[in-house]
Amino acid sequence: MRASLITFPAALALAACVEVDMAIEVLGEDEARVTGFMQMQRQMFEMSGGDDSFCPEEDGGTLTLTDSHARCDFDKTGSYAEIVPSESSSDGPAEVEGELTYLGDNRTRVFLPLAAMNAGMDEMGDDPQMLEMMRQMLTGMSVSFTVKGREIESSTGTISEDGSAATIMLGIDDLIPPAADRIGDFETILRF
């Protein structure tokens, strides 16, 4: 959550084996709410410094530590720029920058370039041992993004039965796929 509540988890999922469940609800032409959690193994949390940058309170985060996991539950309401900052952090892992764009007429575009998470995958694919190690570390983990509004106009994700939400769920085969099966971007246009 260091630089952005939406960009940080996507990139970190690969770098530090973080499970993510995140929802963005568009409330108005420049207001949104992000809720959800990020969770990683306690050992990985401590190896990465074990500090407040994983779950800062000023970003709506609440950190819970157990013997096995570090979990950050978050809930933040703010402007589009506060929920999805456009600048990436230079002190953390490579980030996937998302966008919230007001289109007029109570319509907003939510864009998360998940294909950018594949940066560096070609190098990893050339090292079968590294690929297998990452596959083992990510087994059982998932990354889920949901976008909510009054009505989903279109989405590259799965639209709910009531038409008010679109979700994309990434499992291990999506996070570490062969080059031909790499995931595309998550884009949703909705009315609020």
Image (cartoon, rainbow, N blue to C red):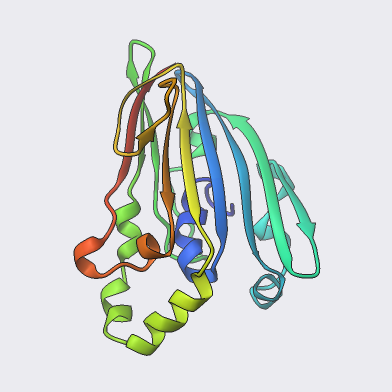
**Residue at screen point 78% across, 56% down:** 64
Q: Residue at x 71, y 70 (%)?
A: 42
Dividing the image into 4 quarters, which one contains the C terminus?
Answer: top left
Figure check: 110 above or below 142:
above
Residue found at the far top of this picture: 105
Q: How many marks?
A: 0
Relative image position of residue 84 (x, y in whole percent): 48, 40
- With 192 as the anchor, is 43 left or right in this view? right
List x then y, in percent, for residue 154.
Answer: 29, 27
The reply to whether residue 90 is visible in this rendering is no
Indicate left or right for 187 with 19 as reference.
left
For the point 53% across and 65% down, the residue is: 140
Q: Position of residue 179 (x, y in %)?
A: 22, 68
Residues 180 and 118: in front is 180
Specify whether 174 is left or right of 142.
Answer: left
> Outermost residue toward the left?
180
Q: Give left or right: position of 109 versus 41.
A: left
Can residue 176 be seen here? The reply is yes
- Which residue sits furthest front? 161
Q: Quadrant of residue 131?
A: bottom left
Residue situated in front as seen by the camera: 153 or 51:
153
143, above or below 127, in the image: above
Q: Which x, y percent locates residue 77?
A: 62, 30
Relative to 80, is 144 above or below?
below
